[in-house]
Amino acid sequence: MSASEPLCLSTPRRTRSFMEITGLWLLLALFVALPFIRRVGWPAALRIASDTTVLTGPLRPDGTIDYARAVDDEYALGVTPDTNAAIPLMNAVGPGIISADVRAEFFRRLGVEPVPVEGNYLQSEEQFFGSDRESLERFRVQFPVASVRPWDAEAFPEVARWLAANESPLKLCEGAFQKERLYAPIISPGSGLLIDAGNGLISQCRLVARLLSVRGTWYLEAGQTDDALADAASIHRLSGLVSQHPLPIGQMLSRAIEVHALGLHAAAALSGRLTIEQARRQQQMIRSLPPLTGVARVFGRAERFQTLEILVASFNQTYGARLAFDVNVMLRHVNRTFDEFDSAMRQPTPRAQQEAIAAVEIRILNEVRKEPSHWELLMSRREGLSRWVSSMSLESGIWTLKQGLAGERRLRSARQMAVLGFVLAEHRANHGRFPESLASLTPEHFATVP
C-alpha cells in the first residue's frame, strides 16, 4: 500500500450461512402461521378427570383408563364362589366358551379351579346334530312349536333327542337358580377395550333357557304340571341373574330369556291342566317380578364408558388425530349428552320419557347433519370439529338405548298378558270354560276391562 492511498478501516462483509438463512425463513413462516396455529392449537393431551374420562382409574400402562377392569371390579363386588351362579353354570357348559388366552384369568377371578376341557357339557343343536343337516333342519321346524305348547317324543323326535342328550348337564344348572348373584368376569382379549369383552357364559344362559322351555312343555304333556311351572320359575330366575350383567348384551339376553319363560307360561295357561290354586300362584309370581330398569342402568354406565373408550383409542392412534381433535372436548360433549339421556330416563311417565329422549336425539342428529366443509375443517376452531365427531359417535348409542327401552316396553306388556292368561286359566278351572268376555273378569280380577 502506498502512502498516497487512504487507510480502509471497514471489515469485509460476512456471508450468512445456510443454517442462518433457513432459520430466518422458519421464523418468517412461524410468524405467518401463528394465527392459524392459535386457532387450531397444539396437539392435545388426554386429561384424566371426572368431566372427561369419568373414572380416574385403574390406568393402563399407556395412561388411559382400563374401563373393562373398572366395570369388572364393580360387577364382582360382594360376590363369593358360594353365592355365584356362574360356578354351577360353568360346570354345565364347560370352559370351551371362554377364549383360551384368558381362560386361566377367568377362573382365577371366579376363585375356583378350571373345569376340564373334555366333559359331558351342554350342547347346542348345531353341536348335537353336527353334520346331520337333515335332522338339524327338522329340529329347527319342530323347536318353535315345542317351546310354546305341550308335546311328546312322537310328535317332535329331534327335539326329544336333543333334550335327552342335555339331561345330565341341565341338572347341574339347577344349583345356579338358587344363587343370589351371577358374576361372569369381564375380560377383553387382544384390544383390552370394553366393547370387545367376551360374554360366552352369559350367551350360554339362553341355551339353558331354551332347554328348560321345551322340557317344561314336555312336562305339561306328561301331566307333570308342577314341574313345568317350576321350569318357568327357573327361567325367570335365570333372566334376573343375567340382568345383573353390566354390559348391554346382558340386558338383551335377559329379555330374550324371559320371553322363553312367558312362552312356557302361555302354554300352561292354555293347557287346561291348571288347578285354581296353581293359576293364582302364577299370577302372584308374575306380578312380583322385579321391575325392568336394566337398560337405563347399563346405558348410563357401560354404554357411556364404551363410547368414551372408543374416542380415546381413536384419538391416540395417530399424531394427526391428536393435532386435529381435542379429545377432552369430545369426552365432555359425550358426557353432557349421556347426562341428558339419564335425566330423560328419569321422567315420571313413559310418554314423558320418550319425548325427552327424542329431544336429545334430534339435537344430536342436527349436529351430525351440520357437516363442516373442507374450508371449515381447515380454518375452524378444533373445538367445533371435535364436537361434530363426538356427536357422530353417539348415534349408535342412541339406537341401542331406543331398542333396549322398546324391548322393555314389549316385555312389560307380555307380563301383563301372562297375568291375564292365568286369570283366564283360573276362570276355566273354576267354571269349566273360558269367560264369554273379558268384562266378566271385573271387578274380581281387574278394576277395568284389560
Image (cartoon, helix red, strand yellow):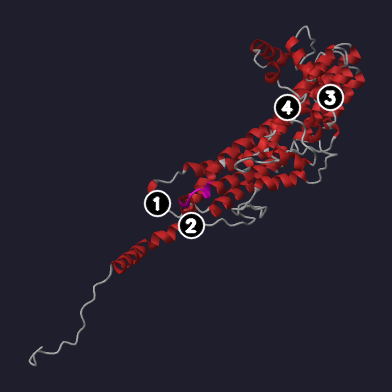
Circle on res. 206: 4
Q: What's under tag 4, amino acid-wise?
A: Arg
Q: Which mark sits nearer the N-terminus, 2 or 4?
A: 2
Q: CA distance from mark 3 to mark 4?
A: 15 Å
Asked whether, in this view, residue 195 is left or right of residue 146, the answer is: left
Say which of 240 and 155 sits in front. 155
Q: Are marks 2 and 4 in contact (CB under 8 Å)?
A: no
Circle on res. 378: 1
Q: Are marks 2 and 1 in contact (CB under 8 Å)?
A: no
Q: CA distance from mark 2 to mark 1?
A: 15 Å
The magenta region covers 314-319
Give the label, 3 or 1, closer to the camera.
3
Q: Which mark sits nearer the N-terminus, 2 or 1?
A: 2
Return the residue at label 3: 171
Q: CA distance from mark 3 to mark 1?
A: 65 Å
Give the label, 2 or 1, closer to the camera.
2
Q: In the image, residue 134 lies at what x, y percent?
A: 65, 10
Q: Local crowd at mark 4 within 10 Å, few (<14), some, or many (≥20)?
A: many
Give the label, 1 or 4, closer to the camera.
4
Q: Is residue 449 visible?
A: no
Q: What's under tag 3, amino acid-wise?
A: Lys
